Amino acid sequence: MKIGHLKINGIDDKRPVIIAGPCSAESREQVLNTAQSLASKGIRIFRAGIWKPRTKPGGFEGVGAVGLPWLKEVKEKTGMLTSTEVATPYHVFEAIKAGIDILWIGARTVANPFAMQELADALKGTDIPILVKNPVNPDLELWIGAIERIYGAGIRNIGVIHRGFSSYEKKLYRNLPLWHIPIELKRRYPELSMFCDPSHIGGKRELVAPIAQQALDLNFDGLIIESHCDPDHALSDAAQQLTPDVLDYTLSMLVIRDNAQTTEDITVLRKQIDEIDEQLLATLAKRMRISKEIGTYKKEHNMPILQEGRYNDILENRAKLGKAMELNPEFVAEIMKSIHEESVRVQMEIMK
Ligand code: PEP
Ligand code: MN
């Protein structure tokens, strides 16, 4: 798969590209009101969910196709491009017929390969830009598989949206950012345009700005942010939507990093990092050789691989050492666990 940068007609790709609008289109007035305020703040791409995938039945499931003419009116009155979510071939046909400019595929749909294939088949022969959200579960291969299905339908104008991953425990975030997943996606497909959806990651208004800033610090190409003319009375995702005024203020406060800077100044520091990584690997290799020797000793003396207390002693002692060195205790625990796991695996090989 050779994915280039997303091209949206009429939008220059000056970072960050902003898409904003309500979670759901609720009424003609709400859609036009919100769109007009956003357009007056310079927003060029409008979003609104016409069909809403709700976790449980009985919630507001979107107004359906009757809302499509409202989006057409937004386009005519404000000049903004419009975008909406599609989850079935019927949505695709209706949205394209109504002149929607950009389609996104939601997290729940991306997690379902059957639904993705149906969408890909329905999109064959079109050249509408498609944004593929990450699946609800933290599975990079599933995300890439969904992108491949769209690519396989001949669509080349593809971008992705990082909207976080659901977890059983909801603490700070509605959906965990797990930044390493989009970072790995970008490593594999460097040209792929990446949007961040801080509204669905945060789930609360106050978190939109800091998450958006993190995304820009990580060089994301754009942001998709929920904005509603009367957020408190929104029929879906009320807690995370910003008024157009607050959105405008939030955007004005974001620091946009300069990705055209030369990297000369950090070359020296990067060299040091390269050397340190080499030393780390050499140290790990040495540790594994010693683990093997211990494994051989245990085998010769008919001892079990795991001795009571030893693993806990290691964890406790390394946690103390790490703390004294001002390392993050969770990070130290994670590293020590995976080193120990590998040592056990190496010794099990010897026991065979
Ligand atoms: C949305 O964008 O309103 C939406 C439903 O998002 P997600 O698919 O990320 O949950
Ligand atoms: Mn929403």
Image: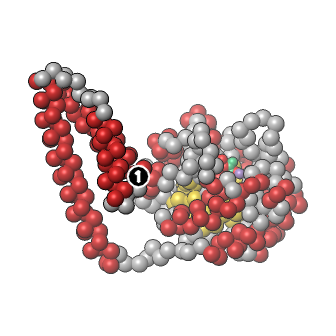
Q: Quadrant of residue 342?
A: top left
- At x 59%, y 65%, the residue is 210
Check the picture and name the quadrant holding the C terminus.
top left
63 vs 188, left or right, is right
Residue at coordinates 73% horizontally, 75% vertically from top-left?
A: 41
Q: Is residue 92 above or below residue 252?
A: above
Instruction: Please provide percent x and percent y for residue 184.
Output: 42, 52
- The quadrant holding residue 287 is top left
**Where is residue 27 shown, x and y percent of the image?**
87, 55
Identity of the amino acid at label 1?
A: Pro
Rendered residue at 55%/71% (across/down) = 15
What colour-coding does the image apply?
secondary structure
Foreground: 287 or 198? 287
Q: Is residue 39 above or below residue 289?
A: below
Residue 200 in sight here: yes
Is residue 176 shown left or right of residue 227? left
Residue 9 screen position, x and y as percent = 62, 66
Establish whether ligand 1 lies closer than 8 Å to the Cβ of label 1: no
Q: Nearer the viewer, residue 301 or 242?
A: 301
Q: Is residue 260 above or below residue 141?
A: below
Percent position of residue 303, x then y: 18, 23
Look at mark 1 in the image and give the residue it sits on. Answer: 329
